[in-house]
Image (cartoon, rainbow, N blue to C red):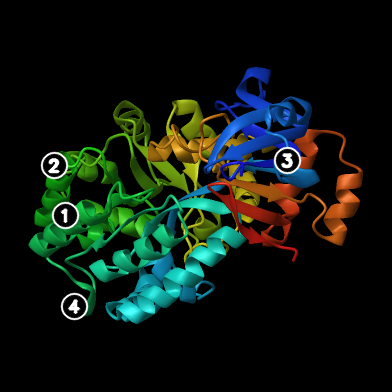
């Protein structure tokens, strides 16, 4: 009757730009009693409740989340869905952990039934945690990406994913070749990229596991498909950095390897970026490439402390990411809590509003999806999450003492997790609800 129109009421918050350390008034929109009018999956009015309700046709159904915070759906810029089942597996650093847990787990994805079952659970878990968009590693098997895209499409989620390219320094059962990686990736791009809300990312695992011929093939794909993403790992730990130096003796740095093969550009996202120098950061800025900051993973694998303050000051685009299964939580709230702590250890105090920016609009910027995602402005997709700052008894006590929006946001990222996600909406439809 109303073309699927509905009204959502609650405390509205979203960023229009990086709020920086000061949180300038122009950088965000906040309505304590706010509303969204949604039609056909898009936001058609957004603002104070009084304004928005006046624009709605009579009889439009209303959902009232007063006392809760409505923010854009979280954007996880780096996560491995095939590692869902090995989260919380101990290891002695990245390279050992890959051998002992990751590669055997990824082997199972040769079976499409396994891929389908994990993809289903994975998408459920994203939504339960308020994550509406993620950039996702598959395995080396093209079928792993088919399964994930099929699942995401059935839920109308805006997902970015790619098949891992990996032709050396890995078990034979997970190895492709330069040519097969090129052919399979190409087929996946042609089949899925731009289909509905799905997008493809060219996904070499990391410089260590791709031959020079394979990195050349990745570069060729990047040239042939300028609209697709590029997704890999960079400078996660020192042993890995040293290995890359050995394997590519001609390179100035680890980043320089990807640069050499034409893999730096806007919508190229590199997880970790812990051990970069000033020249690397300048090159990332010049090419518009982004870093995915994965604090729980970096702490768990003992990889190192990302210098968030330095990256932001240098103008490097940064998104936040869970990096499950090296990361220890699907929750972007918990990830922001860890981000705050890691930044603090590097001498930077991350303001709560800026943290929310990193988990929402900054992710959309990194993925090149700001036309569609990252804010709750009119015209955007109605992907949003309803957060409950009083989700647990302790949070309820603490929020009673909170005197500002900033304090409420800060307690959400310090104490919050999936329990604080009251509901998640994809294209205006409720895709998850905590309470019956
Ligand atoms: Zn990763």
Q: Is residue 38 above or below residue 168?
A: above
Answer few, some or many: residues within 10 Å of disc 3's Cα (few below 14, many 20 plus, some between 14 and 19): few
Distance between the Cα atoms at labels 4 and 1?
A: 22 Å
| Helix, strand or loop under label 2 | helix
Q: Which residue is mark 4?
A: 172
Along the polypeptide, which appears first: circle 3 or circle 2? 3
Element type at mark 3: loop
Which numbered tag is attached to residue 59? 3
Earlier sequence position, callout 3 versus callout 4 = 3
Q: CA distance from mark 3 to mark 1?
A: 49 Å
Label 2 sits on residue: 224
Q: Are dots 3 and 2 in contact, CB under 8 Å?
A: no
Find numbered disc 1 in the image and state the secondary structure of the residue it sits on. Answer: helix
The one nearer the camera, 294 or 116, is 116
Q: Position of residue 245 (x, y in %)?
A: 23, 51
Image-based side of 44 in relation to 419, left or right: left
């Amino acid at each position: 009757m109303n073309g699927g129109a509905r009204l959502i009421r609650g405390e509205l918050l979203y960023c229009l730009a990086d709020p920086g350390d000061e949180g300038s008034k122009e950088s965000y929109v906040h309505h304590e009693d706010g509303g969204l009018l949604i039609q056909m999956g898009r936001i058609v009015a957004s603002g104070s409740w009084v304004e928005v309700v006046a624009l709605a046709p009579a009889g439009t159904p209303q959902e009232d989340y007063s006392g809760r915070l409505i923010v854009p759906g979280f954007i996880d810029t780096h996560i491995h869905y095939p590692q869902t089942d090995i989260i919380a597996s101990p290891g002695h650093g990245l390279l050992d952990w890959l051998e002992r847990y990751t590669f055997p787990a990824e082997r199972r994805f040769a079976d499409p039934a396994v891929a389908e079952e994990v993809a289903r659970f994975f998408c459920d878990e994203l939504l339960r945690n308020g994550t509406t968009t993620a950039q996702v590693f598959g395995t080396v098997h093209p079928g792993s990406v088919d399964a994930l895209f099929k699942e995401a499409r059935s839920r109308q989620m805006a997902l970015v994913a790619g098949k891992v390219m990996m032709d050396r320094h890995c078990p034979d059962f997970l190895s492709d070749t330069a040519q097969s990686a090129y052919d399979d990736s190409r087929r996946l791009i042609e089949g899925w990229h731009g289909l509905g809300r799905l997008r493809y990312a060219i996904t070499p695992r990391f410089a260590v596991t791709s031959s020079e011929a394979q990195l050349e093939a990745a570069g060729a794909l990047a040239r042939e498909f300028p609209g697709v993403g590029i997704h890999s790992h960079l400078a996660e730990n020192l042993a890995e950095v040293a290995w890359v130096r050995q394997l590519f003796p001609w390179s100035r740095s680890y980043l320089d390897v990807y640069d050499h093969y034409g893999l730096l550009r806007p919508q190229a996202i590199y997880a970790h970026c812990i051990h970069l120098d000033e020249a690397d950061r300048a090159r990332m800025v010049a090419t518009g490439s982004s870093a995915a900051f994965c604090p729980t993973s970096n702490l768990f694998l003992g990889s190192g402390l990302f210098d968030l303050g330095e990256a932001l000051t240098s103008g490097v685009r940064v998104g936040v990411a869970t990096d499950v299964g090296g990361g220890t939580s699907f929750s972007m709230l918990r990830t922001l809590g860890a981000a705050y702590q890691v930044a603090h250890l590097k001498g930077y105090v991350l303001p709560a509003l800026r943290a929310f920016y990193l988990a929402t609009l900054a992710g959309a910027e990194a993925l090149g999806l700001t036309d569609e995602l990252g804010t709750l402005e009119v015209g955007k997709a109605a992907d949003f999450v309803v957060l409950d700052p009083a989700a647990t008894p302790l949070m309820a006590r603490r929020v009673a003492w909170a005197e500002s929006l900033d304090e409420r946001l800060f307690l959400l990222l310090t104490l919050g997790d999936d329990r604080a996600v009251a509901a998640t909406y994809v294209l205006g439809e409720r895709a998850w609800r905590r309470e019956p």
